[in-house]
Image (spheres, grey):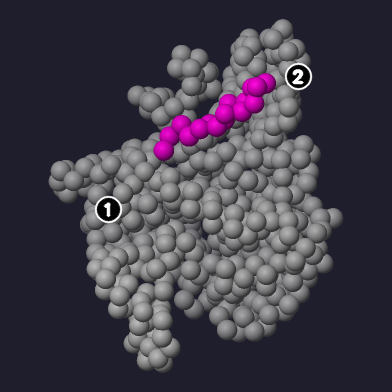
Amino acid sequence: MNDANSNSSAPAGVQPQRFGAAGGAAAFCGRVDLSETLLHTSRPIRSAGVDGAVRVEAPGVQIHVDASRVDCDVQERTITICTGAPRIAGGSDRASAADVARELSRRGRIDASWLRGRFAIVQLDMRARTITAATDRFGVHPICYSHEGATVAFADRADTLSSVASQLDWQSLYDYVYFHVIPAPRTVFRDVARLEPAQVVDIGVDGKRQRFWWEPRFEADPEVGIDRLQRRFIELLQAAVERDVNTDRIGSFLSGGTDSSTVAGFLARVTGRPPQTFSIGFDAAGYDEMAYARIAARHFGAEHHEYYVTPDDLVRAIPHVAARYDQPFGNSSALPAYYCALRAKAAGVERLLAGDGGDELFGGNTRYVTQKVFDAYYALPRALRGGLLEPILLGRQWPRRVPPLRKLARYVEQARVPMPDRMETYNLLDRFGAGSVFTDRFLRRVDPGAPRELQRAVYGRAQATSLIDRMLAYDWRFTLADNDLPKVTGSTSLAGVSVGFPLLDDDVVDFSLRLVPALKVRGLTLRYFFKEALRGFLPVEIIRKRKHGFGLPFGPWLTRHEPLRALARGALAGLVERGIVRRELTEELLSVRLREHAGYFGEMVWILLMLEHWLAAKAPDFAV
């Protein structure tokens, strides 16, 4: 077991936009004029540049790709670029850009009948004067674009297009503080959009059309026996890991949780050798789960690497990591994931497998049980709820003075909040109130209700009848596509390694859609089917443990580490100077609130800290 703990600092400085494998560099970008001149253009010219860059040019067309990460097919009529690993239905190998171009020509449109895998696809049809762009089911490979008149610009990073639309979007900044990320289709740039998961856009001289080429349909098959389901599940997991192993220099994240342990175990089975696993620890009570990672590593005979992140690491890395994301990003686990990926890179690993998706596919998040308990309230007769419980518990003061009744009243209050609003009961921005966080001038430029409307739209679009499945569909968008997956892809890219998500393999996802909800959350037991299927494969301690992951003890560290506190104080002061947040909020956060609950309120400090460091790097003169 390798206990590497030499705390190396992050690479200095922020590099200008360029092509290459390093984080912060675009994989592809293009600018196209969909004018009449394209009708008469000659075959595009493809030329190679330095550092693996490829340029494709024609009258009105400029496209640049990093050939180490992007496949580009150039024909007389079409230019097709692909990132990731698209697959054609019925095939097991990665489809090339030429394969995708041929299939798209034959089929006429992108849809789920023939397209699978994780990818970003952009095709320019010069004779039809159209651009088609699509991203995979979970948006692992993003596409951002700007469209004005006949001019279309596109890239995998929003900040690559910032010269096209340099003004920041006020609403997106508000959404960031609410969600801790900026959900698609918005980006931080006013005129730059990002495709939603499984979305395709067709842009022509007559405008644009958007649709979803795939949408999850939760259609359970209750007739299939549990033993058969478990055998099929194991087969699919192994095949998914096999598909993601595209190099000998491969390893896996290992938090000690169910998902990462499963991936590490199947990596050992697929490769036939001890897997290289990488774990992060914290010297903070209640946050360190290294003991579970060690249990899993021993169980699978892993070559295990550990690293303990320190407050000093955060001080060094925060400005660097914040600046390398293409827009403000506030998931605090990005820093541990980054240091974990750095250790993998130092060990010679080129690709890491991550366990993201298991909770959201198979019912592993605590909130699923929480909301199930609240939903049980509606099993009571309406006459009992409306005629007795609510008038007494909510309409009178004396029950609030009796502890058991006070608790019951709080339960009824929360249960009466409709979904999905009920899942945001502890939202930090709602708890503080927008008027206590933002300046009046900032608030006049935004719609505080926009985030809730987006959440309701996504929840309402779910093609599911059960509460559990509707929450899963909701989390596929907001927890996975907009948050956890960009966290991992951004952190690994910054460290210089690629990443795979075998639990989000199409076949595994399709399998989860056919499971009855009671097998995902059985009573108050989370991940019932997943754990039963892997009983005997995973250590019993892992089966029984509670979910945690690489949670960062930022709040507790903030209360006792002065350099980290000084960094936070300076960042919050910067947001006050810009006219975005109220000075009173920053003073309250760094004094009263952190003493009250460092973990909870430290999260608000974190998202504001990351926002200011992104603005300082990307838009230093921005102010309200």
Q: Quadrant of the N terminus?
A: bottom left
Question: Dot 1 surroundings within 10 Å: few (below 14), some, or many (20 or more)?
Answer: many
Mark 1–mark 2 Cα distance, whole angstroms, equals 52 Å
Q: Report the predominant secondary structure element of the magenta stretch.
A: strand
Please give the range of residues in magenta. 200-215
Residue lying at 30% horizontally and 69% vertically, measured from the top left: 377
In this picture, is 189 found above or below 558? above
Q: Can residue 594 be seen in the rendering of this structure?
A: yes
- Left or right position of 478 against 299: right
Judging depth in this view, the residue of 193 and 4 nearest the camera is 193
| Depth check, front residue: 31 or 491 | 31
Question: For residue 266: magenta?
Answer: no
Q: In which quadrant of the rendered image does the C terminus lie?
A: bottom right
Q: Amino acid at mark 2?
A: Gly
* Amino acid at the residue labelled 1: Pro
Q: Is residue 520 left or right of residue 41?
A: left
**Residue at x 41% of width, y 74% of height:** 413
**How would you rate the neighbour count of disc 2 (Cα within 10 Å): few for under 14, some for 14-19, many for 20 or more?**
some
Which residue, as the protein is rendered here, is positioned at the far right? 621
Residue 213 placement (x, y as % from top left): 46, 31
Position above or below: 557 against 549:
below
Report which quarter residue 328 is drawn in. Answer: bottom right
Going 59% across and 23% down the picture, which residue do you hit? Answer: 123
Work out whether 581 lies above or below 512.
below
Tag count: 2
- Left or right? Give the position of 105 relative to 172: left
Residue ID for mark 1: 517
On the image, numbered disc 2 is attached to which residue? 60
Mark sitting earlier along the chain (1/2): 2
